[in-house]
Image (cartoon, helix red, strand yellow):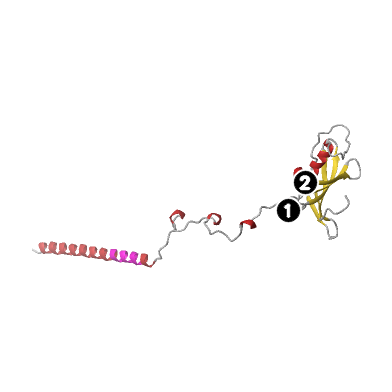
Amino acid sequence: MNEPNSRTSKQRKRKSERLLNRLIFSIVLLVVVTTVILINIDMPVKQVAAPPEQQGETNIPTSEKTHEPSDVKEEEIKEPSKSTSQPIEEQTTSPGIVSKPEQDEDSIVIETIVDTSWEPIGTKQTGYHESKYDGKSIDWNEKKEAIAYATLFDVEDLIFWKIKNGGDEQRSIGIVSTFDKKHKYRVYLQWEDGKGWKPTKLEVLRTLDFEY
């Protein structure tokens, strides 16, 4: 007689257990979701840098940025010219150049320069070499070329005040200047058979007012 009541009681108990389990699951789920939300709220938001093309300002090199004209007047901008400082500037980049400034301010020489990279300029002369000072021979013109080579000027840019014997037939000395006389030099030459005249020393001069 009590069996139906027993079954009904068991069924009710199972339903209660299922309902309780669902309720527990729902509570746990709610706790988890709430915890995740709170964690996300507390975490700082990381800002991802936009690519350069999307940023408000492009990193343009300083040299390419548009700028207002400078206050430098046009006449103040000058190209570097050849000067007595040119061999000094080359000394810093060429280990073979030896420059010796003259300490005596009364000397006609400002400084003496020797460049170990100087080479004979070549020659068209053959056979026995005869040094000439006639103002027209091949030897004379090759002397002029060797002198100009040492000064870093072209032959056409120089006045050749004097080319003279340097002590023997194989040595010569040339005194030259630019046409404006701002640059003045004395160049020492040495003849090498089959190779031509070679500069051996260059003196930067303070003046041309001396005996050649």
Out of 46 and 118, give the one closest to the viewer. Answer: 118
Q: Disc 2 marks which residue?
A: 158
Seen as rendered, the residue at the extreme front is 180
Where is residue 27 shown, x and y percent of the image? 27, 66
Query: Where residue 156 sits: x, y (%)?
Result: 75, 43
Mark 1–mark 2 distance (CA, rounded to whole Å): 21 Å
Residue 120 left/right relative to 43: right
Is residue 136 shown above or below 49? above
Q: Main secondary structure of the magenta part?
A: helix
The amino acid on which the numbered mark 1 sits, given as a three-letter code, is Glu
| Residue at left offset 81%, top offset 39% | 142
Q: Residues within 10 Å of mark 2 (few under 14, many from 20)?
A: many
Tell which of 131 and 116 is nearer to you.
Answer: 131
Please say whether residue 158 is one of the residues in the magenta stretch.
no
Secondary structure, mark 2, is: strand
Taking the image as drawn, is residue 144 in sight? Answer: yes
Pointer 1 or 2: first along the chain: 1
Q: Is residue 145 shown above or below 4?
A: above
Find the magenta span and give its range: 29-38
- Image quarter hosting the N terminus: bottom left
Front residue (pair 136, 94)? 136
- The kind of residue tagged 2 is Leu
Q: Residue furthest top?
A: 127
Which residue lies under the disc numbered 1? 89
